[in-house]
Image (cartoon, rainbow, N blue to C red):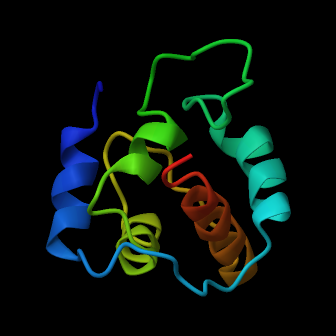
Amino acid sequence: MRQLGWLVGALAMMAGQAGAQDVPGDPQAGADLAQEVCAVCHVVAADQPSDPGVGPSFLEVADHPATTELGLRAFLQTPHATMPNLMLTPEETDDIISYLLTLKGG
């Protein structure tokens, strides 16, 4: 669970109901974007052939009890020293969040 502590702390502050959520966005578009942009540093899918070993896997993030749509939205819009400054469109943000939440409990 490397480097998961900073994310857990941020998400815990925004923890809400982590159950099924009606989230805007297209999870398949989010999965495609994650493969294109995020897989350089993160394992973004269970079938990813190798672990880049830089950031936490999307499965670890999704399965954390504090992971919610609101927490992910705030996290993705806040600069972090350990992440590149991604400039996601609102639609891309919705798609990534939608995809991450499909991994919850899976």
Q: Going by the image, does 38 lie left or right of 70?
A: right
The answer to whether 10 is drawn above or below residue 1 in the figure is below
Q: Going by the image, does 88 lie left or right of 85?
A: right
List x then y, in percent, for residue 62.
Answer: 46, 52
The answer to whether 90 is drawn above or below residue 15 in the figure is below
Residue at x 64% of width, y 41% of height = 38
Residue at x 56% of width, y 17% of height = 52
Q: Give 81 or 46, whichever is nearer the viewer.
A: 46
Residue at x 23% of width, y 74% of height = 15
List x then y, in percent, for residue 66.
Answer: 27, 63
List x then y, in percent, for residue 47.
Answer: 74, 24
Q: Give 83 or 95, whichever is nearer the viewer.
A: 95
List x then y, in percent, for residue 85.
Answer: 51, 55
Q: Going by the image, does 41 lie left or right of 71?
A: right
Residue at x 53% of width, y 82% of height = 21
In terms of image quadrants, where is residue 87? bottom right
The answer to whether 94 is drawn above or below residue 87 in the figure is below
